[in-house]
């Protein structure tokens, strides 16, 4: 049994990129591992949030966790700010990090674009993420490919501290999906599908209605060649759609290419709409039930208590190594 930890931000619009790239593996891992999954609300305030909407989005993501099959009896589900150790460890790690390594993070560079008034939270975001992971002696972190650089930074910080104070942290490993680890935007397949992109047809959210799914897929960017085959360099749009088809249907990519030999993009896209709607409908039905139930809040409250019980002794160990505090 390995300790597994991962988190998702409560920023609305959880999309099929988040699901296929990360959330899907959360479910598989919960049967044979000691899993902890968090709604990282403190990460979301790195950009301004409307408090009322944020509270709703926290519950939305937690309900989605359960709707995709995470079971609070098997995995700990909780909200980051309900466990104070995340913020505390984050400061300790801040003092073991370098401004240089943080300024090299591509996510920060993209989001701040050299703007002097870019938030400090955006800059130190990867340190809070490292704290999330190290607070639980995590061994495995299932995430999308886009998080590789943040995981490497977390490992670097853990190793650096261990070199100073032996056996302070467990050094974690990232776990990335083999296929669909990076789902691309439907309107610009050279960029990853993102919650924050302006065009809603660039993504398919897990809670989209069939008519919206259809519109987004039918509008998706392809190319003028007209054959259904994967070629990420020349045909990123259709390659992305085939990958999504494969991930939802469980059919291997070469079999999909064979099945659609001689067919046009229109026919393939129509089938992709059906495959996607079929995969998302049961999730949406469970979501509607869980979101309005009391079971959700109870699960999160119990989850926070269980998470805190694991975090407290680990934080005590870390503080002791650094010589902090006098309370036993
Ligand atoms: P976005 O860019 O859409 O705002 P994010 O990475 O900021 O996404 P999170 O909610 O924190 O959003 O991400 C949850 C998980 O989804 C992470 O493990 C991340 O790696 C993964 N993920 C996000 N976008 C994609 C994508 N397009 N393809 C595959 N995985 C993704
Ligand atoms: N930065 C991550 C979300 C995240 C996370 C974590 C993922 C915050 N803390 C700890 C894994 C482990 C992202 O996906 N954007």
Image: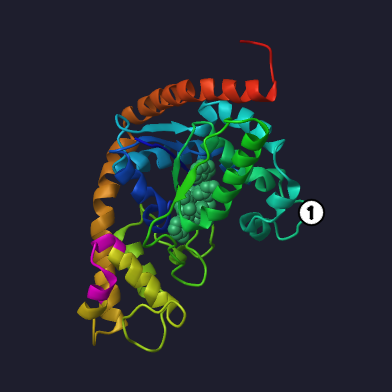
Q: Main secondary structure of the magenta part?
A: helix
The answer to whether residue 7 is above or below residue 321 is below
In the image, the segment drawn in magenta is 247-256
- Taking depth in this image into account, of 215 and 299 the one nearest to the observer is 299
Quarter of the figure with residue 298? top left
Image quadrant containing the C terminus: top right
- Taking depth in this image into account, of 304 and 284 the one nearest to the observer is 304
- Which residue is drawn at the image coordinates 69% and 20% (left, top)? 324
Residue 152 located left or right of residue 186: right
Q: Is residue 290 visible?
A: yes
- Taking depth in this image into account, of 262 and 49 the one nearest to the observer is 262
Image quadrant containing the N terminus: top left
- Which residue is drawn at the image coordinates 65% and 60% (left, top)? 110
Residue 323 located left or right of residue 35: right
User: Residue tagged by mark 1?
Assistant: 116
- Which residue is drawn at the image coordinates 34% and 87% (left, top)? 226
Residue 128 located left or right of residue 194: right
The percent coordinates of residue 212 (x first, y second) are 36, 63
- Taking depth in this image into account, of 94 and 240 the one nearest to the observer is 94
Q: Is residue 9 visible?
A: no
- Which residue is drawn at the image coordinates 58% and 44% (left, top)? 154
Tell me if the residue at label 1 has its CB under 8 Å from ligand 1. Answer: no
The percent coordinates of residue 186 (x first, y second) are 43, 69
The percent coordinates of residue 119 (x first, y second) are 71, 47
Residue at the left extreme, as displayed: 259
Q: Is residue 250 magenta?
A: yes
Quarter of the figure with residue 59? top left
Quarter of the figure with residue 182? bottom left
Q: Is residue 103 magenta?
A: no
The percent coordinates of residue 210 (x first, y second) are 29, 61
């Amino acid at each position: 049994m390995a300790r597994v930890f991962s988190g998702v931000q409560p920023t609305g619009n959880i999309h099929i990129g988040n699901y296929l790239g990360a959330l899907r593996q959360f479910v598989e891992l919960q049967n044979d591992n000691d899993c902890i999954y968090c709604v990282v609300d403190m990460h979301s305030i790195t950009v301004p949030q409307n408090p009322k909407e944020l509270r709703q989005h926290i519950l939305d993501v937690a309900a989605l966790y359960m709707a995709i099959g995470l079971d609070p009896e098997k995995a700990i589900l909780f909200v980051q700010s309900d466990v104070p150790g995340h913020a505390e460890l984050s400061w300790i790690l801040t003092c073991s990090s370098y401004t240089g390594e943080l300024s090299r993070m591509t996510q920060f560079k993209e989001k701040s674009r050299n703007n002097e008034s870019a938030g400090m939270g955006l800059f130190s975001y990867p340190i809070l993420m490292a704290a999330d992971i190290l607070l639980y002696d995590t061994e495995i972190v299932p995430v999308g490919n886009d998080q590789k650089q943040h995981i490497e930074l977390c490992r670097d910080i853990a190793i650096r501290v261990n070199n100073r104070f032996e056996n302070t942290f467990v050094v974690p490993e990232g776990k990335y999906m083999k296929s669909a680890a990076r789902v691309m935007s439907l309107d610009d397949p050279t960029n990853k599908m993102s919650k924050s992109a302006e065009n809603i047809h660039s993504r398919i959210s897990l809670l989209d209605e069939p008519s919206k799914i259809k519109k987004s897929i039918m509008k998706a960017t392809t190319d003028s060649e007209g054959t259904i085959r994967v070629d990420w360099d020349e045909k990123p749009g259709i390659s992305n759609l085939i990958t999504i088809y494969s991930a939802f249907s469980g059919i291997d990519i070469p079999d999909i290419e064979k099945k659609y030999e001689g067919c046009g993009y229109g026919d393939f896209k129509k089938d992709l709409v059906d495959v996607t709607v079929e995969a998302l409908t049961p999730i949406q039905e469970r979501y509607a039930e869980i979101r309005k139930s009391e079971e959700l809040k109870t699960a999160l409250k119990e989850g926070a208590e269980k998470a805190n019980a694991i975090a407290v002794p680990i934080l005590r160990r870390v503080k002791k190594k650094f010589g902090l505090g006098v309370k036993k």
